[in-house]
Image: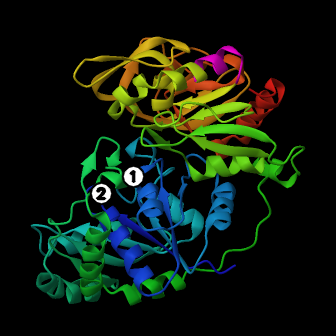
Amino acid sequence: MNKPRIMIAATNSGCGKTTITCGLLSALKKRGMKPCSFKCGPDYIDPMYHRNVLGIESGNLDTFFTEDDVTRWIFKEECSGDIAVIEGVMGLYDGVGGVEKKGSSYDLARALDCPIILVVNAKGAGRSVVATIKGFLDYDNHNLIKGVILNKTSKSFGQILKPIIEEELGIKCLGTLSDISDINISSRHLGLILPEEIADIKNQLAILEKRLSDEIDVASIIEIANSAKAMEQTAVPNSLAILNKPSESVNTIKLAVAKDEAFCFYYRENLSLLEHLGVNLEFFSPIHDERLPKKISGILLGGGYPENHLATLSANEKMKNEIKKAFDSGIPILAECGGFMYLLDEIESFDKKTYSAVSAIKGKATFTGHLVRFGYAIIEDRERRIKGHEFHYYDTDNNGSDFVASKPTGNRSWKCIHSTNGGAMGFPHLYYPSAPEFIIKYVEAMKNYGGY
């Protein structure tokens, strides 16, 4: 199966992977191509950019969450159009705990046999850039790095470095991306700020696309992507064998999924798995709606930024009462991070004001000013085990104790999650394909509940 693909990776965070990825996707569209994209690692913001601003299908791939066969299967299922552009995470070789190979951009590229374009921050550097690139090439055991882009340096100086890099290292220098300080792609505590919050983002991306097309050899990038080896057809992995079985009730079990400005963090793969299991997803807004969808058997409250909409969420008494009533009736709820905070009694704002929430779970969420329990986690109870991650600046006085989360490296662990009514409500973001049996049990709980 021919799947042209390329990974945009970097020597470290802050080199401009996202900027170049967005510019490249725009350039490919400008050429009449139909790209799709993937983000390496647990990230919601970048795929949201690609979907909402560029109109490009985007998903997440992560070799910590899934084994090679599942990772490849997800890629093949979601890969569409002419070319796939995969954005790396952190530095190319930085995996779990910053030191493991697992979960790194390079490990994903290895699993997919994907050519890599290495982005190097060349600001304030000269020939030293050659030594940096050589070090990364020496680590490349699978010969996947096929080109480099020099970021944050002038086009003219890039032309001086280009022959040195190509002659000494035997790798193609694809160009530079010089000063783009006038393009407003800002940063926030969860990565890039939401697309809706960037003024005139499409105009800015058009400027970025033009500069990238002027300075970077896009044609060679396409050529490198086309050089990727054909991927063999594979059956559904054993861990996802449930997908080979027809659902007993295709699209008749209805799940109410919160989706608006406050709750917007969902893995495409999670929602797809639910649909494969016969679940009909019906979206609603805790901000704008007063009622839950009718005849639902479960509620999904994803993460997001409820802390930025506390006054509106708190004032919507009808929706809060609807969710509390459904919870009290025994409906199974999946709630992650911000969605979990919304189920508590209260949430404290950044300026220490207190706002009432749903009051399905006792407790108060407060802003700590620092990351809490950050990173990958393995979440398990006596019967179930699933992988996920935490990334939040809030904490509560009642995180739940029905599961134990542990770091994949080291000995740190902590209690988490309320599993009332067969649901799971807590700070961890879960990646369902890492443990399909976990979500199968949730669907069973929905069936047992009936309808609200």
Tag 1–tag 2 contact (CB < 8 Å): yes
Tell me how far mark 1 sits from mark 2, CA to CA: 8 Å
- Residue appearing at x 64%, y 42% in the figure: 432
Residue 437 sits above or below residue 113 on the image? above
Is 295 positioned to the left or the right of 223 in the image?
right
Looking at the picture, which amino acid does disc 1 mark? Asp
Identify the residue under disc 2: 12
- Note whether residue 452 is visible: yes
Residue 356 sits above or below residue 251 on the image? above
What are the residue bounds of the magenta stretch?
323-331
Helix, strand or loop under label 1: loop
Is 214 positioned to the left or the right of 279 in the image?
left
Is 193 positioned to the left or the right of 140 in the image?
left
- Residue appearing at x 71%, y 19% in the figure: 421
Give the number of marks.
2
Residue 253 position within the rendered picture, expressed as x and y whole percent measured from the top left: 79, 39
Residue 428 position within the rendered picture, expressed as x and y whole percent measured from the top left: 51, 31
Going from the N terminus, do you reach mark 1 or mark 2 first?
A: 2
Looking at the picture, which amino acid does disc 2 mark? Asn
Identify the residue at the far left of this view: 124
Which circle marks residue 94 in the picture?
1
- Note whether residue 372 is visible: no
